[in-house]
Amino acid sequence: MLIFTHENRLLVELARSKLEVAGIAVFLKNEYAQGATGELAPHQAWPELWLERDRDYERAMQLLRDAEGQADWICRHCGESNGAAFDYCWQCDSSRPPG
């Protein structure tokens, strides 16, 4: 069952990681379809994240909705702004503060 698609592969990979960490089995489709965009409509070549088990749909959707609601955070060590999807500072590799 298709759970998430986006033109930005990084966002699809972040969703994949979030679900896999939660123990939800997923797989990618259209992983290498970007080269076919001249033959296909652009949205048909977007990477797609699919669930291996349909029974995980509600839980997976809740996890993805929760991730959307998270705010960016500021590293307490170096002051760098980090996206909500990151658990570690991209600048100094410090862990995200709790809460």
Image (spheres, rainbow, N blue to C red):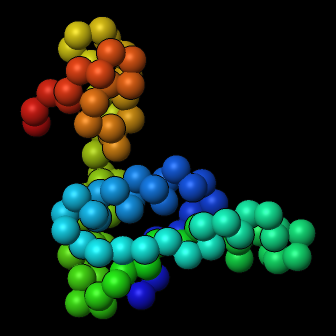
- Relative to 58, residue 32 above or below: above
**Residue lying at 24% horizontally and 82% vertically, measured from the top left:** 56
Q: Quadrant of the N terminus?
A: bottom left
Could you say where residue 50 lies in the image, as x and y percent from the top left? Answer: 43, 79
Could you say where residue 76 lies in the image, as x and y percent from the top left? Answer: 21, 14
**Residue lying at 82% horizontally and 68% vertically, measured from the top left:** 37
**Residue lying at 36% horizontally and 74% vertically, measured from the top left:** 26
Could you say where residue 44 lies in the image, as x and y percent from the top left? Answer: 71, 76
> Is residue 98 visible to us here?
yes
Outermost residue to the left = 98
Q: Quadrant of the C terminus?
A: top left
Q: Quadrant of residue 77?
A: top left
| Depth order, front residue of 65/3 | 3
> Is residue 74 visible to us here?
no
**Residue lying at 71% horizontally and 69% vertically, measured from the top left:** 33
- Relative to 70, residue 7 above or below: below
Compared across the picture, whether 18 is left or right of 13 comes to left
Compared across the picture, whether 13 is left or right of 98 comes to right
Q: Quadrant of residue 7?
A: bottom right
